[in-house]
Image: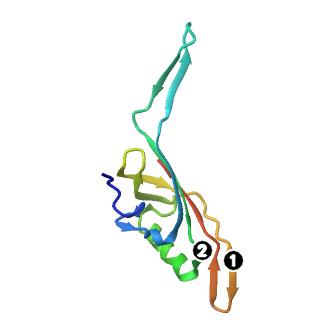
Amino acid sequence: MSRYAGYFLAFGRTVLPNMYLSSFSSTPNQRTELSAYRDNNNLLNRATSPNFKTKITFKTTPLLIDEKITVQNIIAGGYTNYRERKARVTYYNDETDSYNTGDFYLPDINFTVKYCSGRTVLYEPVEITLIEY
C-alpha cells in the first residue's frame, strides 16, 4: 500500500496544493561519488557518499496574479535563509515511497506573462527547481 498522503511538496509546514501543479518530476536519492578508479583488472571501484541528494522540478498550472502570489508565499514560508533561497522542504520520494525532508536551494525563477488586460494578469506555467544541499 502506498504511503502517498495526497501531496508532493510542503514548504516548512505548509503543503503546496496539487491544484497548482501541472507536473512534478524528481530524481530522488542521487548518489555522490567521492572517488572512483579502475584497478589493474579494469574493475571499477567506487567510494560513494552515504548522504543522498534529491533534485525536484515542478511546473505550476497557468496562474492568475493572486494565485502566483499564493504559491510564492507558500514557498517563502519554507525559507530558512531568504537571501540564499534556502528552504526546508518535505517531498514525496518515489524511490522509497515515503516522505523525506531536506534543505533545498531554489535557483532563479522566470515569470512570463501570458495575458494582461486591466488588472487581470495570467502567467504561463512557472517551472521551479529544487536542489538539495
Q: Is residue 70 above or below residue 4?
A: below
Circle 1 SS class? strand
Q: For the point 61% across and 61% down, which residue is it?
A: 108
Q: Residue furthest front?
A: 1
Q: For the point 41% across and 56% down, which residue is it?
A: 91
Q: Mark on residue 28?
A: none
Residue 70, how many percent across, how many down? 48, 77
Label 1 – label 2 distance at C-alpha: 9 Å
- Category of crowding for the residue at label 2, using alpha-carbon neighbours closer than 10 angstroms: few (below 14), some (14–19), many (at least 20): some
Sequence-first disc among 1 and 2: 2
Q: Amino acid at mark 1?
A: Lys
Q: For the point 42% across and 60% down, which residue is it?
A: 8
Q: How is the image coloured?
A: rainbow
Circle 2 SS class? loop
- Category of crowding for the residue at label 1, using alpha-carbon neighbours closer than 10 angstroms: few (below 14), some (14–19), many (at least 20): few
| Residue linked to disc 2 | 62
Q: Quadrant of residue 126?
A: bottom right
Q: For the point 52% across and 79% down, which residue is it?
A: 67
Residue 56, how many percent across, how many down? 51, 53
Residue in the foreground of this view, choosing between 82 and 128: 128
**Relative horizontal placement of residue 19, taking residue 107 as reference (left or right):** left
Q: Mark on residue 114?
A: 1
**Relative horizontal placement of residue 40, taking residue 89 as reference (left or right):** right
Q: Is residue 46 above or below residue 70?
A: above
Q: Are marks 1 and 2 in contact (CB under 8 Å)?
A: yes
